Amino acid sequence: MRGTSGDGAAEPELGLSLAEIGEYAVISVTGEIDMYTAPQLREAVRQLSSEGRMRVAIDLTPTEFCDSTGLGVLIGARRRLSDAGGSLVVV
Amino acid sequence: MNGSKHGRAAGRVEPTTVNFAFTPAAAYVRAARLVAADVAAHAGVATGLLDEVRQAVGEACTRAVLRHRDRGLEDLVRVEFAIGDRFVAKITDNAQDLRARPSGRIDASTGSGDAQANDHDAIEEDSLSEEITLIVLGGLVEDLVVTGPDANGGTTVSMSWPLPGSGSGADH
């Protein structure tokens, strides 16, 4: 499916990079967040919270596209993090 | 191509159609919205509206894929663009009920099903998404109509955007 590298239009993957700013883990998102790529972002937040990092910031400044699926992930992440005593910041 | 003499003398542009269908998988929603933006640009939709077209068609296709996925339907999602007086986009699914519930619960009369959405903590983003797509579409698109179930049991999201020169009676 994926990984058919080589020919064809390069499909712009979602790019997730992690940084540490203050007490926040900051996920910077490049590319397009949609139904196809949103699970990666959801997983990234889950990964952080499973490591006990409940203060998460998501930086959408470099994001090219975000649809309702992305909104759903943000809403879900916020709920999970605040339920666990953390918080979500979206930039 | 060959300098036809005033093919649009009647003031009415012949409708042009682009349509395709895709397997209801998330991977192809991007293709659909890219085609939408490209066809819209070619049709002459104002540059400032192209992002709206792209987003809206993406939302409608996402909704259709979710509806098929929730019901285990493999049928193709159908997409049609028509270029006439306006640029029209129609996205059609084959899912029977207006609002599919993964739990198997089916709401026949769904004006606004937001009430029962709140009582489950466990609702995941995916099951919220169909509602969110409609909310986003409602906020985004001025001319939005959702119809159905149709003869095949599916629903259609119809949207349109203005084209330059249409309705202004510009004679050239």
Image (tube, rainbow, N blue to C red):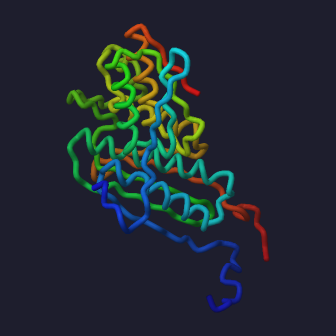
Residue B78, position as x, y percentages in the image: 36, 57
**Front residue (pair B116, A48):** A48
Residue A40, position as x, y percentages in the image: 37, 37
Depicted A40 relative to depicted A13: above or below: above
Q: Residue furthest top?
A: A85
Side of B89 relative to A4 (left or right):
right
**Front residue (pair A17, A4):** A17
Side of B31 relative to B151 (left or right):
right
Residue B58, position as x, y percentages in the image: 46, 48
Depicted B48 relative to depicted A44: above or below: below
User: Residue at position x 54%, y 37% from top?
Assistant: B138
Residue B157, position as x, y percentages in the image: 45, 48
Quadrant holding the C terminus of chain B: bottom right
Quadrant holding the N terminus of chain B: bottom right
User: Residue at position x 70%, y 89% from top?
Assistant: B5
How many circles with numbers are drawn on the protein?
A: 0
**Does residue B14 appear in the picture of this structure?**
yes
Residue A8 figure quarter? bottom left
Side of B135 relative to B128 (left or right):
right
**Does residue B63 appear in the picture of this structure?**
no
Depicted B106 relative to depicted A84: above or below: below
User: Residue at position x 44%, y 44% from top?
Assistant: A14
